Amino acid sequence: MGTVSWCCALVLVLVLALVCPCRAITLESIHWSSANTKFVRGLGLTLYPQIGDKMDIVCPRSEPGEREEFYRVYLVSRKQMERCVIEKSDTPLLNCDKPHKDVKFTFKFQEFSPNLWGLEFLKGKDYYITSTSTGSLQGLDNINGGVCRAKSMKLVLRVGQKFASEAGQTNPSGVDGFDPGLILWLVSGGVLLLLVVFIISVVILCKRRRGHCVPDRSQSASLSLNTLTVPKRDSISSDMGSDRSDVVFPLRASDSMICRHFERLSSDYGPPVYIVQEIAPQTPTNIYYKV
């Protein structure tokens, strides 16, 4: 029973290790740049992340001599995104004000965040991200219009929803009709099934081998007191002055037998008197006693 319980616990751990993380994937990074052609004019970009997925929004980086772009990226309401308006009380998710450094914001699509200020996403809800900066350093803090209106740089995140093939909408897997997370889940499920079958087979085999164990023949063939052919004469029926035969045999004839120890007390008056005491087998087996 203990072996079966241990195997069940092992299978459960493997299930949690293989199945739980297999659906979560890292989505392709979104480069927040006017050169990103994924922002469709008039529509923007729509993604379908699932709970557990990760995604980065990356600020544009320019080499010395190249055109620099500056943005403040906000998480806004649907009404704000449609109107391309940022309120002064809004806090930016990402400040792209260092064009010569790698700056990014990582989304972890989780329903509960251990961080007090971390973002939390509900399955089936839409989230909207945009920027009203103009792209230049002077228009970094612009709160109306900007690239939201001019370049349709707005992002819709439909968390935990199914992909709908429409213009301006992108499957997070990058391939229409196929989700790599689903493929990975199927492959992991097949591997897990084979592993479970293997473990169960090993347990059954061990039980069968244990049930067909053959006792040690050498032990069963050891000397038994009942097989001794030398007769032992009773002290009452024996002749006067006669004594027991000098028979020597090992005290441990077998694991299940009890050896009788005979101790002679006196024979001065009448027949000899013996005390019979039963003792358990002794170890080591090379100890002999004379009776």
Image (cartoon, rainbow, N blue to C red):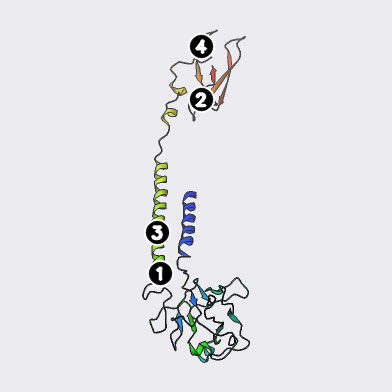
Element at label 1: helix
Q: Is residue 24 above or below residue 8?
A: below
Residue for badge 4: 238
Element at label 2: loop
Residue for badge 2: 252
Question: Residue 94: which quarter of the image?
Answer: bottom right
Q: Position of residue 212 (x, y in %)?
A: 39, 40
Residue for badge 1: 180
Element at label 3: helix
**3D distance between C-alphas at marks 3 and 4:** 81 Å
Q: Is residue 201 above or below residue 278?
A: below
Mark sitting earlier along the chain (4/1) = 1
- Quarter of the figure that contains the C terminus: top right
Mark sitting earlier along the chain (4/2) = 4
Q: Which mark is residue 191?
A: 3
Mark sitting earlier along the chain (1/3) = 1
What's the residue type where badge 4 is placed?
Ser
